Amino acid sequence: MVDYWKDFGPFHGRIWLDSASEGPLPRIAAERAAEAITWKVSPHLMTADLFGRIPRRLRHVLGRLIGAPEEQVILGNSATFGIHLLANGLPLRPGDEILLVRGDFPSDILPWLALEKTGVKIRFLEAKGTLPDGDDLKENLTPSTRLFCTSWVHSFSGTAADPLSLGKICASHRVLFVLNASHALGTRPLDVTEAGVDALTCVGYKWLCGPYGTGFCWIRPEVLDTLQYNHAYWQALLPRDYLLKEDEDLTPRGDVGARMYDVFGTANFLNFHPWTASLEYLLGIGIDRIEEHDQHLVDRLLAGLNRSLYEPLSPEAGRGRSALVVISHRDPKRNEEIHRILQREGIDIAFRRGRLRISPHLHNSESDIDRLLEVMNALHF
Ligand SMILES: Cc1ncc(COP(=O)(O)O)c(C=O)c1O
């Protein structure tokens, strides 16, 4: 295994196995964050050029990550940002139906729920697993369904959906397909032009190792053109030399495109400068290789788990398996206590919906997994 862990930390002796909550910032990105602080400490360094360069570079690298032209990337601050944009901007009419997944993460649900007061119907699909397969989706589409929104990887069960098959079904029923890729991007490759999605939203601070308060979305241009959303930011809409001009010409630039929906305060130096470094670092390694690394650690964890004590609840094989391993003690009432014991031992995992969630990423090594297994497998209550 490559020692990627050397590019992270220090972790002060602790083992961080919860990238599904917060991915750690690589050292190179921490250096960029420090650089961005120096700009603000000495504002003469915060040049007009930087205001353009910071978002431009981030947009470029995000475009590379998803295989989209950079001018189609919308910079945000969360996963919710993109869903919110769609929920508030799509021309939905009373009687139109939005199909959501029961038990999905609230970012995928709350922005749509508010549409009920406009007469839009919200329906919940009850999947046979935690996320729907093609059959679940087909059974739940009705002639009124306009849009289907789901997580790619489910936060609480670690199950990965198959966006390709879901996307094909949506396309054949003329249903818009919105995918929250927050637990997939950075752990598996994606080419958005082949994935069959109409819109994709993602956080930056988990598997993409950015600071908290980062995210982005991509919306298929034909769908973007239908948005009716008042999101008027002077820095996006007006020519770059606006402040230098004598006249007060508020005519928007002609070349704004998707950028007009960027989060306000787009030259977000302290967050976007280090996030760009994280993304360049991840892309430098290659997402295929990161997937191999993460899945090797998942293999090791699943192989070493004492099955008489613990039951894996997330898929153990196939494309339904992700980098989120969700397990339970055979006596689920013990899970909370196990989480506490691990924390005392310097090992941080997540306790979600009564289960244990372990999510290793690039900064973890085999020895992190071995130490986790050593503590967990020794717990005989
Ligand atoms: C699938 C998923 N989407 C989104 C989020 C976070 O959402 P936001 O960035 O909108 O706060 C999480 C957080 O755990 C998540 O699991």
Image (cartoon, rainbow, N blue to C red):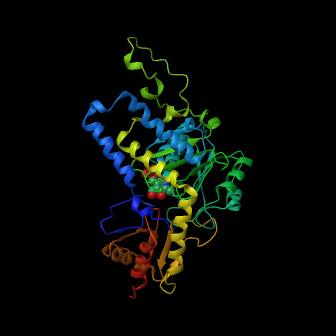
Q: Quadrant of residue 39?
A: top left
Residue that appears at 38% across and 59% down: 8
Q: Position of residue 57 (x, y in %)?
A: 47, 38
Judging depth in this view, the residue of 360 and 87 nearest the camera is 360
278 with respect to 193 (left or right): left
Judging depth in this view, the residue of 282 and 342 nearest the camera is 282
Residue that appears at 61% across and 67% down: 129
Residue that appears at 40% across and 14% down: 248
Height in image: 289 above or below 300?
above
Q: Is residue 252 visible?
A: yes
Judging depth in this view, the residue of 120 and 167 nearest the camera is 167
Q: Quadrant of residue 134?
A: bottom right
Height in image: 226 above or below 311?
above
Q: Position of residue 338 (x, y in %)?
A: 38, 78
How many marks are shown on the rendered structure? 0
Q: Which residue lies most toward the right here?
A: 172
Q: Which residue lies most toward the top here?
A: 247
Q: Position of residue 369 (x, y in %)?
A: 45, 74
Pick the quarter of the image with the C terminus: bottom left
Q: Is residue 102 visible?
A: no
Residue that appears at 41% across and 81% down: 374
Q: Position of residue 171 (x, y in %)?
A: 71, 47
343 with respect to 251 (left or right): left
